[in-house]
Amino acid sequence: MSTQTLGLSEQLHRYVVAHNPPEDGVLADIASETRRRWPDSVNMQIAPEQGAFLALLTELVAPRLAVEVGTFTGYSSVWIARALPTGGRLRCFDASTEWTAVARQAWQRAGLDDRITLHLGDATETLAPALSDDEPVGLAFIDADKPAYPDYYETLLARLAPGGLIAVDNTLANARVLDPQDDDAAAIAAFNRRVTDDERVTSVLTPIGDGLTLIRPRG
Ligand SMILES: C[S@@+](CC[C@H](N)C(=O)[O-])C[C@H]1O[C@@H](n2cnc3c(N)ncnc32)[C@H](O)[C@@H]1O
């Protein structure tokens, strides 16, 4: 949640973006429509440098199946879906029909709708039943309700393909992890502790965006 990496000046952010793969018209249109229709929520969208980074991770992992929990108006899903290998698929989970209508239009416009499936509803109920052991998850991106992060994490870790990766957004909670005073910040701080202490995985909290933690099972 942040359209710019935490702590970067405007000038440095422009420099970073100018030295990354650019946003195309589809991504720029998602961003501008989101800003116009939901100005108070636009910050929920990931930063462009984070999108480019997620796309690079997707290329590296080359998942047959990627999963996104928290799609909003589609910005991060377009970065991920475009970077999938041939035949790769993305399953998106979100509770909002209204926000994901913008995503659906963008997927169609970008020619991505044949590789994305949207699961509408509360992801604490829809995620596990939608995943099967025959179709392990190569890459997962968690970016939905913070108190449910442990639930999404356990569900996805149990279904991760060999060499798979889980990326978790907002793990700095806009710096509120330093002194959590609200439910979301407290949930994130507890999640960070849990993952750091989890001996099943190696995790790295990168300061990109609002904190993006990368997690993979230990060999
Ligand atoms: C931070 S936004 C996702 C931003 C998106 N990844 C992007 O970069 O544009 C969080 C999304 O999670 C969804 N969400 C929140 N709680 C949810 C739940 N329990 N189940 C499914 N979706 C949920 C919201 O509807 C919202 O679209």
Image (cartoon, rainbow, N blue to C red):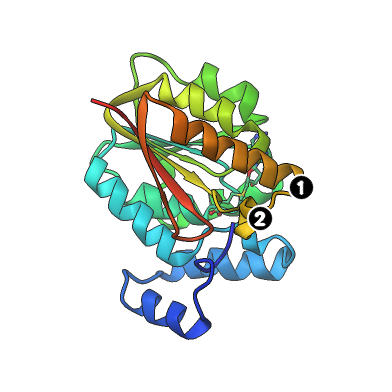
Q: Which quarter is ligand 1 in? A: top right
Within the image, what quadrant is residue 157 found in?
Answer: top left
Depicted 20 relative to depicted 186: above or below:
below
Q: Residue at x 35, y 57 (%)?
A: 53
Q: Which mark is residue 176?
A: 2
- Residue 95 % position (x, y): 67, 37
Mark 1, residues whose alpha carbon is within 10 Å: few (<14), some, or many (≥20)? few
Query: Is disc 2 placed on a helix, strand or loop?
Result: helix
Q: Which mark is residue 171?
A: none
Q: Earlier in the sequence, mark 2 or mark 1?
A: 2
Within the image, what quadrant is residue 160 found in?
Answer: top left
Alpha carbon distance from label 2 to label 1: 8 Å
Query: Is disc 1 placed on a helix, strand or loop?
Result: loop
- Residue 8 % position (x, y): 49, 74
The residue carrying mark 1 is 182
State the residue lying farthest toward the top: 133
